Amino acid sequence: MAETSIKSMDAIVSLCKRRGFIYPASEIYGGINGFWDYGPLGAQLKKNLRDAWWQDMIMNPCWGRPGPDGEPVRCVPVETRIIQHPKVWEASGHVGGFNDPMQTCRQCKKLVRADHVDEMLREAEWFGPLVSLFESGDHLDIDRLRQWIKKYGAKQAKGMALVREQKKVLELLLALAEDLRNRGEEMTLHQFLQRIATPPESAQLCDMCPNCGGDLTAPRAFNLMFKTFVGATTEQTDDNAAYLRPETAQGIFIQFKNVLDTTRVKLPFGIGNTGISFRNEVTPRNYTFRSREFEQAELEFFCHPDESQDWYKFWRDFRMEWWQSIGLRGDNLVLREHDPDELSHYSTGTSDVEYRFPFTAPGFGELEGIAHRGCFDLSQHQEHSGAKLDYFDTERQARLQAQGLPKDEINKQCRYIPHCIEPAAGLDRGALALLCEAYTRDESRPSPEIMRFHPRMAPIKAAVFPLVNKDGMPEVAAKLHAELFKRFGHLGFIETDPKQSIGKRYARMDEAGCPYCFTIDSETLTDQTVTVRDRDTGAQERIAIDRVTSYLEERLDG
């Protein structure tokens, strides 16, 4: 089966728009950067992903397998609010420390994240030809630089000092090359780029703006939380200020005690939550990968400090296995353990499940982080709120009493602030990874674009087609469609369509990712069999019409 190895992000985006997976938000008004809407197929795809996470992490956690303690894993759900008390974010550190380093272009006035500048420059149309001009400090081809200014700079990099003040900047560039040559050194690419971005009168070298080539200010902190105001008053003050949550996790931590008091759950156990979060990304980019509004699926798993490393390794390995189980396989998916200098101050271990998106290749982008958060969050909220968030372990108490330990020692070991392991996934990024993984081109087919979703994730589970729209075939198709919809409709769409040639209908289902098509033809009317077509192979077989439901059940489970 012919398939190209390089996937085009432009082709994926085009198919997503054409087939109703993802639309630009507010498109009829020109759109709004960093926000995306899901169409019918995209909404169902993301629901399937969310439902799978909910089932495998909360309702039947880890598919029923035991945890490191040999007991079944126990988890319960909550649903917490987008707006919490402002002090929640002070305690969590988001108000004071949830910042990105930002730079402003002095020419076009755009803000860019300092840690995104290099990547954004590489994507700029004018940047590649500019870098190709640079060779070394003793060999600067000024004539080719002038040609670049005329062809690219004057149109696409108007803010660059080299473009705005060509003569002066070229003189400074040549002087720098001469000075380096006299010292036996060569000009680096970084020195070259800084020099052509920096105005001649500036005493400090500047980085280059990815938008216009202009000079950037020094990085400064920028808080990523969206601020809002609560209440009927029109006066906006600190007294009625609030924030849209930047993560769902804190809602779990502040309800920890309520969950303990209102359920029979005991440690170790997890509390799961899915929902929308917001981050005021200054440079949202790469389609839905980095958005200002996004959905998370987070579990906070609470355990005894002495058992926390075992639980961290357990959840790290299971989450990698889970992403593989829903269709992300092969070299595109990796589990990366953070280096010590990457860890948060409270973490003793963090791993990322990463996927190789077309826009990150050959590198990877984060899908999910699994973090050992220690007792940081519960301790912070206990300190700031005054509420007791420690835990008394009655099961551990019984074991220690049986061992004959003194009461004081038992109390010391049994009352503690639990440690927390946090598998935190991005559902929008997960849906995007599923789209990128599924997208396939098979040039041997009349319609070459195919979305090879895992059946559990596919938004359309099956399609029923009458071969022609006459001779009693539509009536048989309608009956089978109704039966399949009754049985599988809660899992996704069951399509039917009598129009156009059967080849075109198959092609539409391939683009939508439908794994199985059932066709009613003249033989159906005589021997009660239907044709089943497999999306991935294009192969067809005949099965009895009364076997269609069981056929699908076998293939849609898990």
Image: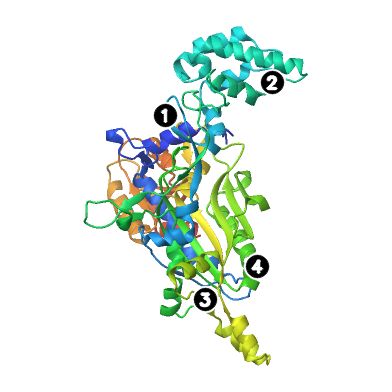
| Image coordinates for residue 495, horizontal then vertical, percent | 34, 48
Label 4: how many residues lie within 10 Å, few (<14), some (14-19) or many (20+)?
A: few
| Image coordinates for residue 330, horizontal then vertical, percent | 62, 46
Tell me which amino acid carries mark 2: Met
Which residue is label 4 attached to?
310
Label 3: how many residues lie within 10 Å, few (<14), some (14-19) or many (20+)?
A: some
Distance from disc 4 to disc 1, alpha carbons, whole Å, reads 50 Å
Which residue is label 2 attached to?
187
Which residue is label 3 attached to?
390
Residue 331 position (above or below residue 202): below
Residue 22 position (above or below residue 543): above
Distance from disc 2 to disc 1, alpha carbons, whole Å, reads 29 Å
Label 2 or label 4, whichever comes before in sequence order = 2
Q: Nearer the viewer, residue 201 or 12?
A: 201
Label 1 or label 3, whichever comes before in sequence order = 1
Q: Residue furthest top?
A: 143
Tell me which amino acid carries mark 1: Lys
Judge whether residue 182 can be spotted in this image: yes
Label 2: how many residues lie within 10 Å, few (<14), some (14-19) or many (20+)?
A: many
Residue 109 marker: 1
Q: Nearer the viewer, mark 1 or mark 3?
A: 1
Q: Nearer the viewer, residue 305 or 217?
A: 217
